[in-house]
Image: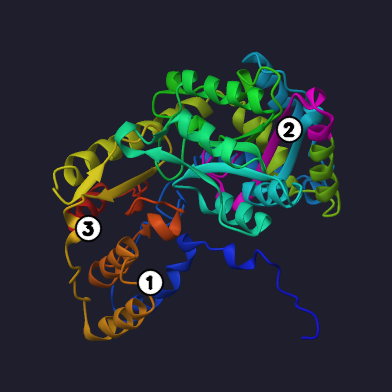
Amino acid sequence: MRTNIVHPGAGQLHYEIRGIVELAEKLAATGLEITWENIGDPVAKGEEVPEWIRQIVAEEVQRTASYGYSPTKGLQAAREFIAADRSKQGFPLLAENILFFNGLGDAINKVYTWLNPEARVLGPNPAYPTHSAVEAAHGRSAHLTYQLDPANDWLPNIDDIRQKVEAHPEIAGLLIINPDNPTGAVYPRELLEEFVALAKEYRLFLIADEIYANLTYDQSSFVSLGGLADGVPTIIMRGLSKEVPWPGSRCGWLEFYYLESDPDFARYAKSIEEAKMTEVCSTTLPQAVLPAILGDPRYKPHLQKRREKYARRAAEAMEVLGSSTALNVVMPRGAFYLPVTFSSEYLQQPLTAKAANPEAQKLLDAALADIPADAFDKRFCHQLLAATGICTVPLTTGFNSSVHGFRMTLLESDDTKFTKTLVTIK
């Protein structure tokens, strides 16, 4: 074309979690049964949404108002419910400082897209790909990261973060995913306070993706950044998709804290709202039922049951996979994912797994031909998929990780099938 129409950051938009599905579907056509461990959809893995939640939604669907537009910021009742809940926890959040989106993917896109093109956000490594890909596309170069240490429960070293901030004056914000995806790490209060102190020292803003907050196995161990920010401009991300669970609702929101502390941050937040205004609003139905679902006395026991299940799954995975000399596993503390890394000895071994049938072998050979020889974990995941049908995601290419491994989920509803998956991988 006479003018280049490709965005300079287009090459940074990778999403391996869904990218590997194309090969899996081709393998399924050869007769191979696929075990989907690539994506965090509780409903697809057999979790039943409780009848009482479905009843609330069904009743709301009968109301004509649920088919109309909502205000751009979101329904007032939903925002007031969230603000009141945070107020009980001592958070300085006003209803007017809550903004709804069509899922956190929509929110994440707006947060990075409307950041000054010269400003960058430092995020964790491994990274959740929606954050890392969109931030990298915004910055037109690789996502800047701080290292999560598997030898220290996948927690970061604040000195490493300080060094990155000092080396890159373009860093304007710090991203925390707590509980973390893909590692399942839960950040202790002391570490979060160090993030706040660092943000104060270097005049940075903070983003805390807390979509899995209510899925921390030990709820007493979770501390929200909203109660610790202490005047630091902060964005907290929450949503319904993982905890209800209702991923198809596409309902997430941003909570803005301490807008008054910095005029640039206030204007930035306003630009995000204005960008949302050009789309008119977010989906009305999930906002309409949010107070009734989250405020129901059955909701907390519902969450507790799910937390207990994931904790059991994690413990079993630790026992089975942790007994392998090839694999390293750290006990997750929240969410429903399990990252598995490889021992240094195993990383030196050739990967020779064969596909389950001749047609699958042809597909595998073609796929491996396009994967670099040093992409150990990606080659492993492809061979695992073609040999057994177990679909996992490599950490390096899937989660911008400097550590080789793969991520699976703890979502399988069938106990026998989950055990079989672990044993097969081992």
Q: Which residues are magenta?
A: 238-266
Query: Helix or strand or loop: what does disc 2 sit on?
Result: helix
Q: Amino acid at mark 2?
A: Ala
**The disc label shown at residue 347, or none:** 3
> Residue, x 18% and y 68% (percent of image)?
350
Lower sequence index among marks 3 and 2: 2
**The disc label shown at residue 78, or none:** 2
Task: Count neighbours of disc 3 (C-alpha within 10 A) and say few if under 14, some if 14 to 19, many if 20 or more.
Answer: some
Q: Amino acid at mark 3?
A: Leu
Q: Nearer the viewer, residue 37 or 402?
A: 402
Above or below, comparing residue 225 to residue 316 in the picture: above
Lower sequence index among marks 1 and 2: 1
Question: In the figure, is residue 152 to the left or right of 5?
Answer: left
Question: In the figure, is residue 224 to the left or right of 319?
Answer: right
Q: Amino acid at mark 1?
A: Ala
Question: In the figure, is residue 405 to the left or right of 87?
Answer: left
- Quadrant (top left/top right/bottom left/bottom right) for the C terminus: bottom left
* Whether residue 54 is visible: no
> Residue, x 83% and y 44% (percent of image)?
271
Q: Nearer the viewer, residue 92 or 189?
A: 189
| Distance in Å between CA atoms under marks 3 and 2 | 50 Å
Lower sequence index among marks 3 and 1: 1
Above or below, comparing residue 145 to residue 137 in the picture: above
> Residue, x 57% and y 56% (percent of image)?
133
Q: Which residue is mark 1?
A: 24
Query: Which of labels 3 and 2 is toward the front?
Result: 3
- Please check the rendered image and state whether residue 120 is part of the magenta-colored stretch, yes or no: no
| Distance in Å between CA atoms under marks 1 and 2 | 40 Å
